Image: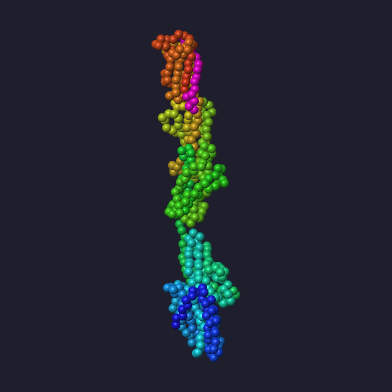
């Protein structure tokens, strides 16, 4: 027997009420002469043996010789709700039926039961309709370590639906209650879960006094976990190009969603200054350049925070590294004092510090001038023997990691300027063997040098643009007379300023 309704399930009850009134009026005369049985009261629809639906009802006490069972389904082509006749039971005391033709674990079905006798049958249209509970979704979230379940709600519970009980079993253990939700909810999240564990669930609907229940088929899922980073090691922080601070670190090969770079001025109160994220390959770069650092003003402390592929922060290491700030000044015309802070962060500490000096204005590159112990944070550079250049000295400190890793960190660079110095004799003798009258300049621009001699009448009698050439006391090939002469020296100092120096020299014959 096939009974088809052209209405959707959501409007079936309204349609049923209208049709009932028509049927009652149309068959009033027939009912006056026949005893039509009442539809039995549905008790529940549940799942038995974790497979087949079981339909339960309360048997009628009169005018009934048996019961007919109908199964509802949604037609896949029309979308209509169709009820198929399953069987008839010739037993007035029967109270349940197992539908072994369908699996309650893969599809949701609706059921009706009507009563009949030898002459009449109850009106199936107004019979109670109940459905199986089908778990439609069981999703494992590896990041939150949780299972989310969703199910088709149970309808027409006697004495009103009170809610749902979620029952769970771990690795075949007895089912226990994992939680409850209200009647208006048909979803639940179970957490936290143990990795590598098979969880089996079933949903049990209950009425308000919990005297009746309906249970779904079981669904199972085996949880897993993901590879989390096990280590992160900030290798170094170093000043780059005297403008920025570069950071380099190592992390293991586990998928990583992002790194956070944190900075502090004083070793505490760290703040995030940047994030490096890769949500496609989960392999963000392991280096960063801090362009906001003022490398000439202070040193900085840095940390790296690691986030796994689920975006969870992992407290792998709390070690911070500190950059090197170099300061310096001249204490005399020949001594330059340098001071710096220790590099911090390496596990075994600093092996040594190396001091580099470059004489600006010459063709000589920066060179190492001192190798110091790990405890040394100052150095005095004696430049008394240096005459080349313009009196501008550039310094850098290099820290070398202890332990043979050959990791290094450089400080900022500083420039110390020494004022131009010129030593000039005040007299020369033209006797044989006496040296020429030649200034002894230090730290001037050789290209700007000009040396002039004048007699007392203001006549120029000598000129040289070479630092190596002095006046031999002659003019036009003849020795000049014993007298006082005026010299004028022009040059540029270390700052590029034009300087003139005048004085007198006595010639003795």
Residue 348 rendering spot, x and y as whole percentages: 49, 44
496 part of magenta stretch: yes
Residue drawn at 42 percent across, 20 percent down: 465
Residue drawn at 48 percent across, 40 percent down: 244
Farthest bottom residue in view: 33
**Secondary structure of the magenta portion, mostly?**
strand
Front residue (pair 313, 407): 313
- Quadrant in the picture for the C terminus: top left
Position of 334 relative to 299 (above/below): above
Front residue (pair 82, 237): 82
157 part of magenta stretch: no
Position of 493 relative to 351 (above/below): above
Position of 107 relative to 281 (above/below): below
Farthest left residue in view: 477
Magenta-colored span: 492-509
Residue 281 rendering spot, x and y as whole percentages: 43, 54
Residue drawn at 46 percent across, 15 percent down: 453
- Quadrant in the picture for the N terminus: bottom left
Position of 288 relative to 76 (above/below): above
Determine if residue 232 is in view. no
Determine if residue 152 is in view. yes
Q: Report how many numbered discs are placed on residues in the image.
A: 0
Residue 221 rendering spot, x and y as whole percentages: 46, 66
């Amino acid at each position: 027997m096939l009974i088809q309704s052209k209405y959707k399930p959501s409007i079936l009850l309204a349609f049923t009420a209208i049709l009932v009134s028509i049927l009652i009026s149309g068959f009033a005369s027939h009912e006056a002469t026949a005893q039509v049985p009442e539809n039995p009261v549905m008790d529940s629809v549940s799942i038995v043996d974790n497979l087949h639906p079981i339909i339960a009802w309360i048997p009628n006490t009169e005018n009934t010789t048996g019961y007919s069972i109908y199964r509802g389904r949604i037609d896949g082509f029309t979308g209509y709700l169709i009820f198929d006749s399953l069987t008839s039971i010739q037993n007035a005391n029967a109270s349940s039926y197992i539908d072994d033709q369908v699996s309650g674990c893969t599809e949701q079905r609706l059921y009706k039961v009507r009563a009949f006798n030898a002459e009449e049958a109850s009106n199936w249209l107004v019979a109670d309709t109940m459905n199986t509970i089908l778990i439609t979704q069981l999703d494992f979230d590896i990041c939150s370590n949780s299972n989310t379940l969703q199910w088709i709600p149970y309808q027409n519970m006697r004495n009103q639906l009170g809610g749902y009980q979620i029952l769970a079993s771990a690795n075949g253990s007895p089912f226990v209650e994992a939680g409850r939700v209200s009647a208006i909810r048909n979803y639940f999240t179970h957490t936290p879960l143990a990795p590598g564990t098979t969880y089996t669930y079933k949903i049990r609907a209950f009425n308000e006094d919990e005297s009746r229940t309906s249970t779904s088929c079981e669904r199972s899922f085996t949880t897993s976990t993901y590879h989390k980073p096990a280590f992160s090691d900030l290798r170094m922080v170093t000043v780059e190009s005297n403008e920025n601070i570069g950071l380099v670190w190592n992390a293991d090969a586990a998928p990583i969603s992002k790194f956070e770079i944190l900075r502090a001025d004083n070793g505490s109160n760290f703040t995030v200054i940047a994030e490096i994220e890769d949500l496609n390959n989960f392999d963000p770069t392991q280096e960063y350049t801090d362009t906001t650092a003022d490398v000439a003003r202070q040193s900085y402390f840095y940390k790296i925070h690691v986030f796994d592929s689920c975006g969870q922060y992992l407290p792998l290491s709390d070690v911070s590294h500190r950059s090197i700030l170099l300061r310096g000044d001249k204490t005399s015309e020949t001594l330059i004092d340098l001071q710096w802070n220790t590099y911090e962060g390496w596990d075994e500490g600093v092996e040594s510090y190396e001091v580099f000096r470059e004489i600006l204005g010459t063709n000589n590159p920066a060179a190492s001038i001192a190798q110091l112990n790990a405890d040394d944070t100052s150095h005095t550079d004696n430049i008394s023997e240096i005459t080349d250049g313009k009196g501008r000295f550039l310094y850098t400190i290099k820290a070398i990691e202890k332990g043979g890793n050959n990791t290094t960190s450089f400080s900022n660079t500083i420039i110390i300027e020494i004022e131009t110095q010129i030593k000039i004799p005040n007299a020369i003798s033209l006797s044989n063997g006496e040296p020429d009258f030649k200034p002894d300049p230090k730290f001037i621009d050789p290209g700007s040098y000009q040396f002039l001699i004048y007699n007392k009448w203001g006549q120029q009698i000598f000129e040289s643009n070479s630092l190596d050439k002095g006046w031999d006391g002659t003019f036009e090939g003849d020795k000049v007379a014993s007298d006082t002469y005026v010299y004028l020296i022009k040059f540029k100092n270390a700052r590029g300023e034009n300087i003139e120096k005048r004085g007198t020299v006595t010639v003795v014959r």
